[in-house]
Amino acid sequence: MRAVLEDALACVHRPDETARRWVQREAREAEEWLFSDDAHGIFSYVSVCAVLGLEPASIRQDLRCRNSSHPEPRQHSRVT
């Protein structure tokens, strides 16, 4: 699970390869996963953070701070 999270973060932070379409697609998919509140599935972002003892909101805030051009995430329905 840690590797999944690390890979998503790496996909978002590939500034040298942003011109390649597949890299842009991976970055977009990683951002969607990182900003999703969906808790269904063992490898959902929320589930991965829970297993690893991480706070999803803290990681998201750090991502926003590192990339100030990142828009606020779209609101996803919360699963309770």
Image (spheres, rainbow, N blue to C red):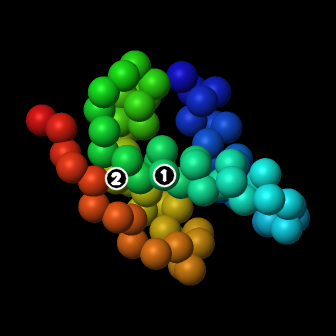
Total marks drawn? Answer: 2
Q: Which residue is mark 2?
A: 57
What's the residue type where badge 2 is placed?
Answer: Ala
State the residue at coordinates (27%, 54%). Answer: 76
Whether pointer 2 and pointer 1 mark residues with C-beta atoms closer than 8 Å, the reply is: no
State the residue at coordinates (85%, 68%). Answer: 19
Image coordinates of residue 72 in percent, x first then y, are 39, 72
Q: Nearer the viewer, mark 2 or mark 1?
A: 1
Q: Is residue 1 above or below residue 21?
A: above
State the residue at coordinates (30%, 45%). Answer: 37
Q: Is residue 48 above or below residue 60?
A: above
Among all residues in the image, which is located at the extreme left?
Answer: 80
Q: Is residue 18 left or right of residue 35?
A: right
Q: Is residue 14 left or right of residue 37?
A: right
The residue nearer to you, when weighing 24 against 72, is 24
Among all residues in the image, which is located at the extreme bottom?
Answer: 69
Badge 2 marks a residue whose secondary structure is helix
Question: The C terminus lies in which quarter of the figure?
Answer: top left
What's the residue type where badge 1 is placed?
Answer: Glu
Q: Which residue is mark 1?
A: 32
Can I make out residue 50 in this image? no
Image coordinates of residue 14 in percent, x first then y, are 77, 58
Q: Count residues near mark 2 (Cα–Cα under 10 Å), then give few for <14, some for 14-19, many for 20+.
A: some
For residue 69, which quarter of the picture?
Answer: bottom right
For residue 39, which quarter of the picture?
Answer: top left
Badge 1 marks a residue whose secondary structure is helix
Can I make out residue 80 in this image? yes
Image coordinates of residue 64 in percent, x first then y, are 49, 68
Q: Is residue 17 left or right of residue 38?
A: right
State the residue at coordinates (48%, 52%). Answer: 32
Label 2 to label 1: alpha-carbon separation: 14 Å
Q: Is residue 74 above or below residue 11?
A: below
